[in-house]
Structure formats: C-alpha cells, structure tokens
Amino acid sequence: MIPRPRSLDGKTVKLRTGCGALFVTVNFDKDKKIREVFAYLGKSGSCFSSQVNSLCRMISVALRNDVPIEDITDHLKGQRCPTPSIDEGIECLSCSDAIAKAMEIVAQDLKEGVQNGNM
C-alpha cells in the first residue's frame, strides 16, 4: 500500500441526497492522483453516517493500492436507496452514488486543470 504523505490537497463537493446534504472531500497527491475520500453526512452518530464513513475508508484503501477510480466509481454508481434526489442537475440515487459522482467531478476538474496548466 502506498503510504499517505503528511499533507494532500483536496476539493470538497456538496451534493444533496435523500439522507440530507453530503459533503465529499477528495484528496489528491502532487501528481494529481486521487488518494483518499472522506464524506460527511449531517446525521452524525447515525447508521447512515457510519456506513458512509466505512465506505470512504474502503475507497481510500483501494485508492492507496492503485485501484483505478473508474473501477471504484463503476461499482458505486447506480446504487439506489428509497429516496433519490436531484441537486443542480445531478441525480443522486444514494449516498454511494453521490460519492462516486463527487469523485468523478474532482477527477474531471483535475484532468482539465492539468491540461490547462492551472493545477
């Protein structure tokens, strides 16, 4: 497993889910490779919150073992819960679907930033 550097840069994406506002922080290394994901769901101490936290820990382990983010997001996208939502044109079928979409948003921003020399 790739050791975590002392500091990483990151971006936080807020998406509305059926469980409430979900804040997803995606951290990346100096080479703009995504290395870890954290998510905060406003229902602290709830089962939802612990499941989101556990999911992010597993995503981060996979990323630090060089699993491509496309492999991770492909498995998370499309997972449905009973209360999907739409936020600024982005359909969030579940918290895991929202995390995958947040990862893709940051990955696209990083790709565009690298191509434009901005990041």
Image (cartoon, grey):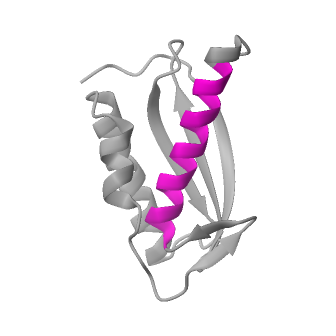
Which residue is at 75% across, 64% downward? Answer: 88
Q: 87 or 27: which is nearer to us?
A: 87
- Rendered-image quadrant of the C terminus: top right
Q: Viewer-proximal residue, 54 or 105?
A: 105
Q: Where is residue 79 shown, x and y percent of the image?
A: 38, 71
The verdict on residue 44 being magenta is no
- Quadrant of the drawing holding the N terminus: top left
- Main SS, magenta region, reads helix
Q: Is residue 80 above or below residue 97?
A: below
Residue at the image position 62 percent from the left and 16 percent from the top? 114
- Residue 2: x %, y % from top left: 30, 20
Could you tell whether 4 is left or right of 21 in the image? left
Q: In this view, does 96 lie to the left or right of 111?
A: left
Magenta stretch: give its range. 94-113
> Quick check: can you spot residue 9?
no
Q: Which residue is drawn at 71% across and 66% down?
A: 89
Q: Which of 47 and 27 is in front in this view?
A: 27
- Kindly identify the residue that appears in the image at 28 percent across and 27 percent down: 66
